[in-house]
Image: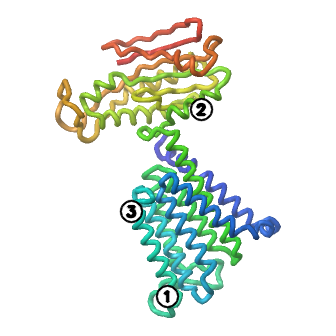
């Protein structure tokens, strides 16, 4: 699959939940009976959603989400409570809101109750005080800038300066989402879009509250997804971990196959090139296994071991997919990057010089469910783990009365 197509699909998976939520919010504001029915609860919904996002992100130490939820809450509170005469403060709020969210997204994650978090709180406090004081400003270059391009008779009260602020922040978040490939930036981008939609409202206060509440729900969902990934996804490789594997296998029924995959001579590789290089290998293997076809899912089992589950497949049906992965990994010619400093003195000194290409091979084994392999645990145990024998390459097929087992040993 071309890289740009994979990137588009990846972005689509990230924005789909939030996009559906934005669409539902827009539909609610367009259907007059529905809007009037829920309008009395708009304020409660908005602040409850933002508070829930803030609390959950604090629990998971997601400072970027927490502080974004905080500035969204302060913005909607200020827009609703500042007097009509303080319209300059409202313009400043609309200008600063997207810039703050883009700033928080750009910074690396440093947690919440940390020196970095305290600095962000101080920044928000200073900005809030400055915005309130701007309510007394009349005339001058600052007000002229904040009102630049404002058209009170147009479909939106947002001047051009604030629109440019939203555009710059949105492009920044989109670039971060594509570069870092994490959910947080995509969630912040959608929350920013929701806030812009709320600020461009038709003058109905509940419409703005609904959209800011939708932004809160988007952030809540992203914090929840982060918590799930922390518990279920392997941090190094990005693959689902053993906990997710156990949950999946507890729901398996009927026919299925399980493949166990070992990276050959991994300990010796670590001793020679160092653990950083070993981590590179595991990431490389995981990226290859994540492309497995046949409706299968790959998991990090532990150490240098990986597991692939093939629902609805026999061992013989799963074999071609496993074998093609094994051959693709061996043929890829993995290139070591960066310094290779082993944690202890290697037995054989590696060749000096620039980045080096090495061949990575795997030993694989596949087992399927059968009459005597009636539970996923038994199938997992039956998947053979090929011994690491020097200079051996063979294929074995056997049926031991428990289920078809196939293994391939490659070096």
**Which residue position is annotated with label 3?**
116
**Which residue position is annotated with label 2?**
247
Q: Does residue 215 appear in the picture of this structure?
A: no
Q: Can you tell which quarter of the image residue 379 is in?
A: top right
Image mark for residue 408: none
Instruction: Tell me: 91 left or right of 156.
Output: left
For the C terminus, give its image quadrant: top left
Q: Residue at x 47, y 85 (%)?
A: 145
Residue 255 place in picture, x, y as percent: 65, 20
The local secondary structure at tag 2 comes to helix
Q: Does residue 341 appear in the picture of this structure?
A: yes
Residue 127 place in picture, x, y as percent: 46, 76
Residue 244 place in picture, x, y as percent: 55, 34
Image mark for residue 143: 1
Q: Residue furthest bottom?
A: 139
Q: Residue at x 19, y 24 (%)?
A: 347
> Nearest the camera: 266 or 82?
82
The local secondary structure at tag 1 comes to helix
Q: Is residue 365 above or below residue 199?
A: above
Q: Residues within 10 Å of mark 2 (few under 14, many from 20)?
A: few
> Nearest the camera: 236 or 56?
56
Which of disc 1 and disc 2 is earlier in sequence?
Answer: 1
Q: Nearer the viewer, mark 2 or mark 1?
A: 2
Q: Can you tell which quarter of the image residue 192 is in?
A: bottom right
Which of disc 3 and disc 2 is earlier in sequence?
Answer: 3
> Nearest the camera: 379 or 193?
379
Q: Is residue 318 above or below residue 275?
A: above
């Amino acid at each position: 699959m071309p890289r740009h197509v994979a990137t588009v699909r990846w972005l689509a998976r990230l924005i789909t939940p939030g996009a559906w939520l934005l669409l539902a919010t827009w539909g609610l504001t367009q259907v007059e009976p529905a809007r009037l029915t829920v309008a009395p609860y708009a304020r409660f919904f908005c602040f409850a959603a933002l508070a829930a996002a803030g609390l959950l992100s604090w629990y998971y130490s997601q400072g970027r989400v927490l502080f974004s939820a905080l500035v969204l809450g302060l913005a909607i509170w200020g827009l609703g409570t500042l007097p009509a005469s303080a319209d300059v403060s409202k313009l400043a709020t609309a200008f600063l809101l997207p810039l703050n969210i883009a700033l928080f997204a750009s910074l690396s994650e440093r947690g919440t109750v940390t020196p970095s978090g305290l600095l962000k709180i101080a920044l928000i406090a200073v900005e809030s005080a400055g915005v309130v004081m701007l309510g007394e400003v009349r005339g001058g270059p600052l007000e002229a800038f904040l009102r630049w391009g404002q058209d009170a008779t147009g479909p939106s009260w947002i001047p051009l300066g604030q629109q440019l602020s939203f555009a710059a922040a949105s492009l920044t978040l989109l670039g971060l989402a594509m570069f870092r490939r994490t959910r947080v930036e995509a969630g912040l981008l959608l929350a920013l879009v929701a806030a812009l939609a709320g600020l461009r409202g038709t003058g109905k206060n509940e419409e703005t509250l609904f959209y800011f509440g939708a932004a809160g729900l988007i952030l809540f969902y992203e914090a929840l997804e982060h918590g799930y990934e922390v518990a279920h996804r392997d941090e190094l490789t990005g693959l689902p971990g053993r906990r997710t594997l156990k949950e999946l296998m507890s729901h398996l029924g009927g026919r299925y196959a399980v493949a166990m995959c070992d990276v050959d001579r991994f300990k010796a590789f670590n001793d020679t090139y160092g653990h950083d290089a070993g981590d590179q290998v595991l990431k490389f293997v995981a990226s290859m296994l994540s492309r497995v076809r046949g409706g299968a899912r790959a998991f990090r089992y532990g150490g240098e071991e990986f597991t692939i589950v093939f629902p609805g497949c026999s061992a013989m049906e799963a074999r071609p997919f496993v074998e093609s992965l094994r051959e693709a990994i061996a043929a890829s010619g993995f290139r070591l990057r960066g310094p290779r400093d082993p944690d202890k003195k290697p037995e054989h000194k590696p060749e000096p010089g620039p980045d080096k290409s090495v061949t990575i091979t795997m030993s694989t084994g596949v087992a399927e469910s059968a009459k005597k392999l009636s539970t996923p645990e038994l199938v997992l145990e039956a998947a053979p783990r090929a011994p690491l024998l020097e200079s051996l390459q063979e294929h074995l097929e056997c049926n031991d009365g428990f289920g078809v087992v196939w293994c391939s040993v490659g070096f």
